[in-house]
Image: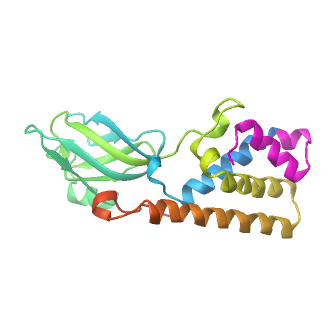
């Protein structure tokens, strides 16, 4: 079974037997919260993305994509066309390793400096070509038309539905037993997704990559 944006909204209303205006106006929020729950609990290889950019000469910062969740790798191509991978470290390590940002050299490390930027050490001496491989937040089902679908609505419809129902019944201050039942169904669906994303899709770390999670 799969959902469009319209059919998922209808299903939420049917399950809750609620068509009150304020409730209906919040259906998109319930769905977004369910999507967020899934993304933060399961890592699927199809939610990986590669983007290309360039370091700026004498600039220790590199912009983070707006849909970024967690890094897998960051590399640059040197003058001999060799790809060099940077090691991901804590920002304090970089600042201790390279306390003077005006000193430039071949980058070796990177860290998340803030929500918008990576920090690089040493500071790049030239505008090198960069490739970032990362776990990203896909476009929400709620961002499209009523007839639109996403990978989650097509392939993780059970998790999406019960995740949204948890949010809906929380909004309604519904009965605890029913919320617990929906949460159990959601966790069951999440377990199936985890088997797909973190077992069946994964063969060897060397070939596929290590599972990466945001810090809690």
Helix, strand or loop for the magenta stretch, by majority:
helix
Q: Which residues are magenta?
A: 1-24
Q: In the visual, does 196 lie left or right of 147? A: left
Residue 13 in sight from this viewpoint: yes
- Residue at the image position 60 percent from the left and 49 percent from the top: 155
For residue 183, side relative to residue 129 (left or right): right
Describe residue 171's horizontal placement relative to residue 57 as left or right. Answer: right
**Residue nearest the viewer, comparing 30 with 198:** 198
Q: Position of residue 28 (x, y in %)?
A: 73, 41
User: Residue 200 at what x, y percent from top left?
Assistant: 46, 63
Figure quadrant of residue 41: bottom right
The location of residue 35, given as percent across then percent down, is: 63, 50
Residue depicted at x 66% and y 46%: 32
**Residue 20 lies in the magenta stretch:** yes
Number of marks in picture: 0
Instruction: Tell me if residue 122 comes above or below residue 212 in the rendering.
Output: above
Q: Residue at x 84, y 40 (%)?
A: 24
Q: Is residue 107 visible?
A: no
Extreme-left residue of the structure: 80
In the displayed structure, 84 sits above or below 186; it is above
How are the residues colored? rainbow
């Amino acid at each position: 079974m799969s959902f469009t944006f319209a059919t998922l909204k209808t299903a939420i209303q049917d399950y809750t037997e609620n068509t009150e205006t304020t409730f209906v106006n919040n259906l998109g929020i319930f769905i977004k919260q369910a999507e967020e729950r899934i993304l933060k609990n399961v890592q699927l290889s199809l939610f990986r993305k590669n983007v290309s950019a360039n370091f700026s000469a004498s600039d220790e910062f590199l912009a983070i994509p707006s849909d970024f969740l967690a890094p897998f790798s960051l590399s640059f191509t040197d003058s001999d066309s060799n790809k060099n991978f940077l090691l991901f470290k804590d920002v304090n390590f970089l600042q201790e390793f390279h306390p003077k940002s005006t000193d430039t050299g071949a980058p070796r490390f990177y860290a998340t400096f803030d929500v918008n930027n990576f920090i690089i050490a040493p500071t790049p001496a030239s505008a090198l070509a960069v490739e970032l491989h990362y776990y990203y937040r896909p476009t929400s089902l709620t961002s499209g038309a009523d007839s639109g679908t996403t990978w989650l609505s097509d392939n993780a419809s059970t998790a999406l539905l019960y995740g949204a129902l948890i949010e809906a019944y929380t909004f309604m201050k519904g009965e605890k037993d029913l919320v617990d039942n929906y949460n159990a169904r959601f966790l069951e669906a999440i377990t199936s997704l985890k088997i797909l994303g973190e077992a069946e899709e994964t063969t060897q770390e060397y070939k596929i990559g290590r599972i990466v999670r945001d810090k809690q």
